[in-house]
Amino acid sequence: MKHINTNNQRAVGLGILIITATVALPGVTCADVVTDWNQTALRATEIAAMPLPLQTRVMAIVHAAVYDAVNAIDRRHAVYAVTVTAPTGASMESAAATAAHDALTGLLPLQQAALDAALKTSLAQIPDGQAKSDGMRIGGEVAEKILALRKTDGAAGKAEYSFNSGAGVYQATPPMNASPVVPHWRSVKPFMMQSATQFPFAGPAEPASAAFAKDFNEIKSIGGKTSSKRTNEQTAIAIHWSGSEIPPLNTVARAVSIERKLGIADNARLFAYLNMTMADTLIAVFESKYTFNAWRPVTAIRSADLALNKGIQADATWEPLIVTPPHPEYGCAHCIATSAGVAVIRKFSGSDKIAASYVYPTLGVLRTWTSLSQIEKEVGDARVWGGVHFRTAVDHGTQVGRQIAEYGLNAYMQLVNK
């Protein structure tokens, strides 16, 4: 059994705690340049300590560049965004490595020395010659053009946010009581969706409704810091998924790639779908968050009297198990990204079954999964058990994530009829 190492992030206050994570994959024997650079890109985003939406954007740009570079040589599938002419025999390996490297150095220039060293290692495994040089040229050209296309995508923008008051309205949450993050992310240009509102959310339950009372009482009972209803395993799951879902899902995709013996071209397509889809889900969910501007459970429970709902009671001292992320509650970002990622991985696996484990050594939390469905359900439950999301936000986020994945899988990078 070989171990694939990556890193993960867990939000702690307004900062990021870097935590090493290890995945045990039965029968793993090898990787390739695409999966190697997938891990390199993840490490680079973690070193940069960037928030989740920015992390997804970097991963999507890198893998879009890798896909178009490899596909320019493989030519079996439709171009994603950049068409270049590749000479016969060009190396897909050197194209993929150079595209990933150049995209990452363009986005994270402070890490250039480490990324240069990674590229040197990748290229050293490829025989010198015209094929290698041609692949490098293709990779560099594609990365440059992808970066140019994303330069004005809105990620560097800003948006003003003003707090309001009333039942159901988002308020700053303890212990940080910070202004909400990235309110402009809803305006970022999607990678595959037509717009941030292409797959609309139905909206949260009204504070005075029976549906809200059901959500409220569930999370009040099981999501509190001192809850006696939550089992030890549920607590472990909630803590495990308090970190970014992007590294675990990419790691599961690498496991599936190895199990299914996918080649470089198929891996390029898999990781492009996976990361562009998850990037789009974050754009869609932040559109929802700042459209509905819904209060978090900690605020709702402490200020329940505002709801005028006879089915709920306030608790001024209630605290969630994990720290509440500083942005509005509806919908669930972890859930939408996970459901989309699971749908992509399942498409390439051809099965719901997997065999993978993931551990945060610092926290001592190990999770072992036997199916992709288990991961999807676990993430949704974790956000309720952790006390940060109502069940409606979980369910709606999961549904929209599936829709975004289905759209991307059917609209882009299809097999070319010859």
Image (cartoon, rainbow, N blue to C red):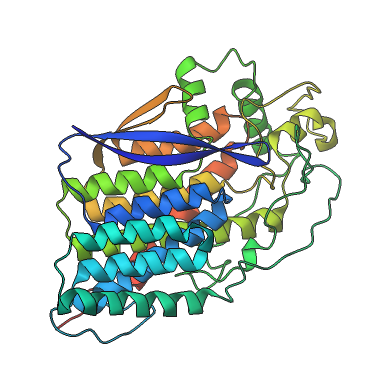
Front-most of residues 397 and 273: 273
Residue appearing at x 24%, y 63% in the figure: 123
Locate residue 124, reporting x and y percent. 21, 61
Locate residue 224, reporting x and y percent. 65, 22
128 lies left or right of 343: left
As drawn, the residue found furthest toward the top would be 228
Eyeballing the image, is 76 above or below 257? below
The number of numbered discs placed on residues in the rendered structure image is 0
Front-most of residues 343 and 225: 225
Locate residue 203, reporting x and y percent. 64, 52
Quadrant location of the C terminus? bottom left
Quadrant location of the N terminus? top left
Residue appearing at x 71%, y 24% in the figure: 319
Location of residue 59 by image quarter: bottom left
Front-most of residues 5 and 304: 5
Front-most of residues 178 and 134: 134
Residue appearing at x 20%, y 62% in the figure: 264
418 lies left or right of 289: left
Locate residue 155, reporting x and y percent. 61, 66
Eyeballing the image, is 406 above or below 297? below
385 lies left or right of 72: right
271 lies left or right of 227: left
Inspect this view and state whether residue 414 appears.
Answer: no
Eyeballing the image, is 254 above or below 306? below
Inspect this view and state whether residue 248 appears.
Answer: yes
Residue appearing at x 54%, y 18% in the figure: 230
